[in-house]
Amino acid sequence: MVDLFVELRKNKGMTREKAIPLMKQPNYFGTMLVKMGIADSLLGGATYSTADTVRPALQIIKTKPGYSSVSSCFILVRPSASGENEVLAFGDCAINIHPTAEQIAETGIECADCGKIFGIDPKVAFLSFSTLGSGKDPDVDKMREATRMAKERRPDLAIEGELQFDAAVSPAVARTKCPGSKVAGHANVFVFPDINAGNIGYKIAQRLGQFDAYGPILNGLNAPINDLSRGCNGMEVYSMAIITAALA
């Protein structure tokens, strides 16, 4: 492990003396197990911050080809009146504080693909306080540009933006604000403009909307590595372990 880590990080000045104590830390040791193919995936974070889970993943596993960063996705689930579960995907709620348009576009694509694993037929809404130009602000421009980039990269996905949340989920509002959209009024993958909105949004859904929230699922890495809250309970560890295994 030490030799491989030194090789991976030699351009950053890594030496055996520096690597040995790092490899004794569970977050680095576990990530190296995935890199070496001894483990298929990793679930960490119960005793580490998100930053301390993501850092070794970026150093050792690295991002997928064509992706500039790691983002996160929460899967939200609650029983519906039909007896089936209502399943939504929210991102990015945990990683990128001030994302660029490119990072937001990547978040939307990765959340859509992640949602498919959990039975979501993705209809992706890039959220804002504006709907299709109704508001004017650099933040609106960024979400509009992120939408354009995501559509260009993945024309197979149903994507719309920028949308206000009511236009994204209410068919009645969508008919007024963006008639003819295949996503507006029926969105099930929600892409937030920054971590403030995303983190607040998923916790509102969890606490007031009675959704169970699973995540953060880390997207954009070359292997499945996921994070737990340091306040997690046994059921959350169990559920995230199953999710992490499903991604492997």
Image (tube, rainbow, N blue to C red):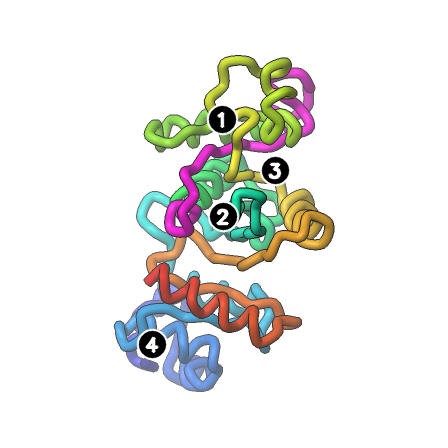
The residue that disc 3 covers is: 193
Q: Is residue 31 magenta?
A: no
Q: Position of residue 18 (x, y in %)?
A: 44, 81
The residue that disc 4 covers is: 33
Measure the alpha-carbon separation of dots 3 and 2.
Answer: 30 Å
Tag 2 secondary structure: loop
Measure the alpha-carbon separation of dots 4 and 1.
Answer: 41 Å
Q: Which residue is situated farthest in the front direction here?
A: 82
The numbered disc on residue 84 is: 2
Mark sitting earlier along the chain (2/4)? 4
The numbered disc on residue 168 is: none
**Circles 2, 4 touching at the beta carbon (< 8 Å):** no
What segment carries the magenta color? 114-141
Q: Is residue 136 above or below residue 95?
A: above
Number of other residues with Cα within 10 Å of mark 3, as a class: few under 14, some 14 to 19, many 20 or more: many
Q: Position of residue 9 (x, y in %)?
A: 37, 68
The residue that disc 1 covers is: 183
Measure the alpha-carbon separation of dots 1 and 2.
Answer: 21 Å
Q: Position of residue 87 (x, y in %)?
A: 51, 47
